[in-house]
Image (cartoon, rainbow, N blue to C red):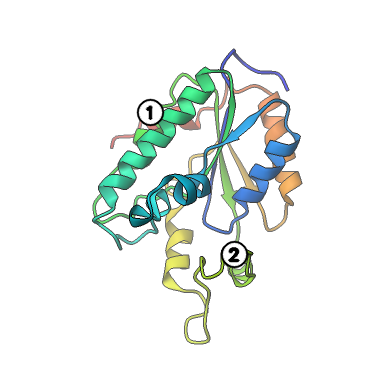
Amino acid sequence: MAKTSATGQIVILNGAPRSGKSSIVEVIQETFDGPWMNLGVDVHARHMTPQRYRPGIGLRPGGERPDLEPFVAAFYAALYESVAAHSRLGLNVVVDVGHHEAYARRRSILIDCTRRLIGLPVLIVGVRCPIEVIMERRRVVQAGREGHYVTGSRDEPIPEPVSAWQREVHIPGIYDLEVDTAVMSPQECAETIRRRLAEGLENATAIQRIASASG
């Protein structure tokens, strides 16, 4: 896969929990040329963030933990600075995140993060998935993630936290590419991303459009 510069390519996968981002990351790491470093939300929240500050950058929409929000902003800033550093060293990076601005007060985290990547080759991908499919995936218990995901009940088939993710995660919805994991396998999503990268990122403008928004 041709590179546009000596810097490593950056792919940001933005979507709700259980939308299929992690599966796409696995395929990218296993099949794309060269090393692709995973600096996404799972790695950050489960292995880097102290227990008392979790879920860290995985904090759900709704302003439920205003005490954590200042740390979340700093965690995100540090994450994206690390992404930039990896790229400048020639390492490719894939980042799976769920950006939203539904905090107790507006923090413009996405705008701040994208500004830290200006000048680097970045492809921002929206990972879409219907909420009905997400609820089916939440009901499947994964080893090591027991009780990690909110599931529905007879009285509340789609819990409000799940609805909030679906409402908030794709705002403003500015992407270079979108994939739908309800109709595409992780391999098909990764191949679509691979083809887009091969075209070159000169016309990938999502990062500039987001970064230029007023915070």
**Label 2 vs 1, first from the N-terminus:** 1
Given residues 144 and 138, the one toward you in this image is 144
- Image mark for residue 76: none
Q: Residues within 10 Å of mark 2 (few under 14, many from 20)?
A: many
Instruction: Please state if 188 lies on the left or on the right of 16 as rendered.
Output: right
Expressed as whole percent of the image width and height from the top left, the position of residue 124 reads 54, 36
- Image mark for residue 134: 2
Q: What residue is drawn where x is 67% and y is 54%?
A: 181
Say if mark 2 contacts mark 1, CB within 8 Å: no
Expressed as whole percent of the image width and height from the top left, the position of residue 79 reads 42, 36
Given residues 91 and 190, the one toward you in this image is 91
Instruction: Please state if 50 lies on the left or on the right of 162 as rendered.
Output: left
Q: Does residue 192 appear in this view?
A: no
**Amino acid under label 2?**
Ile
Residue to which mark 1 is pinned = 115
Expressed as whole percent of the image width and height from the top left, the position of residue 45 reads 45, 50
Secondary element under disc 2, as helix, strand or loop, is: helix
Secondary element under disc 1, as helix, strand or loop, is: helix
Given residues 46 and 136, the one toward you in this image is 46
Q: Residues within 10 Å of mark 1 (few under 14, many from 20)?
A: some
Q: What residue is drawn where x is 59% and y is 13%?
A: 6
Q: Quadrant of the C terminus?
A: top left
Q: What residue is drawn where x is 48% and y is 30%?
A: 83
**Amino acid under label 1?**
Arg
